[in-house]
Amino acid sequence: MSQTPPHAPRKAIVLAAGLGKRMLPITATIPKPLVKVAGRSLIDFALDKLHEAGVELVVVNVHHFADMLEAHVRTREAPRIIISDERAELLETGGGVKKALPLLSDEPFITFNSDSLWIEGQEPNLKRLVAAWDPERMDILMLVAPLSTSIGFEGRGDFHQDSEGRLRRRGTDDSAPFAYAGVAIVKPELVHGTPDGAFSANAFYDRAIAKDRLYGLCMEGRWLHVGEPQAIAEAERCLAASKR
């Protein structure tokens, strides 16, 4: 039985408050985290992977169809769920993390976009991320997906990576080989001193980049980017094929 790494995060936040506009008309009646792929809600994929990786407590932020989402996560036995209520104001990814920070304590924690979905390689990617986390060198370690093997993603990529795993932004380049796959381990110090209200989690990434302490772990398997309704069927075909 494998031992849990000594610096493994025990807490996480699942970012589930977004409006899911690109998933309309489905999200006219349900929140995007409750969209089902292969019969399972996107948020349950996230919560299952966090539980399997040893995370004990997960903060879930809510805004769009908040009552529906809160009722759904309350049916789960594990991991333990705490709701961060953003009904009054949608705070975006960075503001949502900042609001939830008192619930996450002063230890590094995992951020997990509620629509992050992938097919595993030989080892579970979240467990690989936790094992690779080194707080002596890193302020953030994010899971990145190679564009060459990703499904449903049509962007030009987010990051380049050097030989030691550090990331830098695509910047003015036409393309970059890696996309952020929606999961990262973050030190709480990066949140301190950020503005109140709504802002993007890019503020945390930029702080880590400025100190050469933003690192990436290349995903094994295949990232399934479920951004629009038509991407659901393609993701389901890939999941079915992976189980044959």
Image (tube, helix red, strand yellow):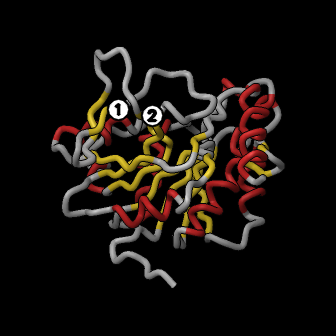
Report the residue at 78% width, 48% height from top.
Answer: 68
Given contact means CB atoms under 8 Å apart, are the residues at marks 1 and 2 in contact? yes
Question: Would residue 11 be found to the left or right of residue 42 on screen?
Answer: left
Compared to residue 7, the image places residue 228 above or below, namely above
Which residue is the site of mark 2?
179
Q: Nearer the viewer, residue 190 or 37?
A: 37
Question: Would residue 226 be found to the left or right of residue 104 on screen?
Answer: right
Q: Nearer the viewer, residue 55 or 201?
A: 55
Disc on the earlier residue, 1 or 2: 1
Amino acid at pointer 2: Ala
Furthest residue to the left?
Answer: 211
Compared to residue 133, the image places residue 26 above or below, namely above
Q: Nearer the viewer, residue 224 or 67?
A: 224
Question: Residue 159: which numbered mark, if any?
Answer: 1
The answer to whether residue 140 is visible is: yes
Q: Residues within 10 Å of mark 2 (few under 14, many from 20)?
A: many
Report the residue at 80% width, 30% height from top.
Answer: 26
Residue 151: x and y, percent? 61, 33
Compared to residue 99, the image places residue 3 above or below, namely below
Q: Residues within 10 Å of mark 1 (few under 14, many from 20)?
A: many
Residue 37: x and y, percent? 77, 44
Residue 146: x and y, percent? 46, 36
The answer to whether residue 16 is visible is: no
The residues bearing labels 1 and 2 have C-alpha atoms spaced at a distance of 6 Å
